[in-house]
Amino acid sequence: MSETTEQQSVIKVRAALALLGARGEVRALDDSARTAKEAAAALGIEVGQIASSLIFLADGEPVLVIASGGHRVDTTQLAAVLGVNEITKANADDVRAATGFAIGGVAPVGHPQPLRTVVDIDLSRYDEVWAAGGHPHYVFPTSYDELLRLTAGEAAEIGV
């Protein structure tokens, strides 16, 4: 990702957070946070505190799933929550089309269009969780309740 694109994606997330009245500020990390494990190590927190924004296709429609970094998404559970027949993981092109972000930096806010969102209830165990800020080197702190509000998300058990 070029520096210009990086700046634009992070600015987009900052603007969305401000518009939505979020408490946390996007901050840069010295090391990449492309994976939940990398992000947790860079922040010195438990991997479960990472709110990973993942895109799945539910009967062909993009859905944002915000999963605890300590979980794998159970697609059978997710299909039941969404009331759909088929769940597939989106490819890189689908992710960028749905969110405007590249895999590894997908933020839970700042998408071109609102996405149906499911938030992993396991994130509620933590007072503070961290989400991507639009680029693999940027993150922001939030809470489970705020994440539900920011995304108009539906709380559900979706991880194993």
Image (tube, rainbow, N blue to C red):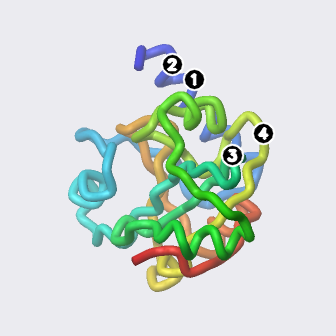
Is label 4 in a helix, a strand or a loop?
loop
Q: Percent x, y for residue 47?
A: 30, 67
Residue at the image point whose x is 64% and y is 33% from the top: 12
Disc 2 marks a residue whose amino acid type is Thr
CB of mark 1 within 8 Å of CB of mark 2?
yes
- Residue 136 in the figure: left or right of residue 82: left
Q: Earlier in the sequence, mark 3 or mark 1?
A: 1
Q: Earlier in the sequence, mark 1 or mark 4?
A: 1
Answer left or right for 54 relative to 16. Answer: left
Residue 89: give x, y in percent of width and height.
50, 49
Camera-nearest label, 2 or 3: 3
Q: Which mark is residue 133?
A: none
Q: Are marks 2 and 3 in contact (CB under 8 Å)?
A: no
Q: Return the x and y of residue 75 as percentages of the image width and height.
A: 52, 66
Mark 3 and mark 4 in contact? Answer it, CB < 8 Å.
no
Q: Which residue is mark 3?
A: 60
Reading the image, the residue beneath label 1 is 8
Q: What element does badge 2 sit on?
A: helix
Cα distance between the residues tagged 1 and 2: 5 Å
Quarter the N terminus occupies: top left
| Mark 3 or 4, nearer chain start | 3
Look at mark 2 in the image and give the residue it sits on. Answer: 5
User: Closer to us: mark 1 or mark 4?
Assistant: 4
Is disc 1 placed on a helix, strand or loop? helix
- Considering every residue shown, the one lying at the far bottom of the view is 125
Which amino acid lies under the numbered mark 4 shown in the image of this protein? Gln
Horizontal arrangement in the rendering, residue 73 relative to residue 154 (left or right): left
Residue 20 vertical placement versus 68 (above, below): above
Q: Residues within 10 Å of mark 1 (few under 14, many from 20)?
A: some
Taking the spot 55% from the left edge, 57% from the top edge, the residue there is 24
* Mark number, residue 113: 4
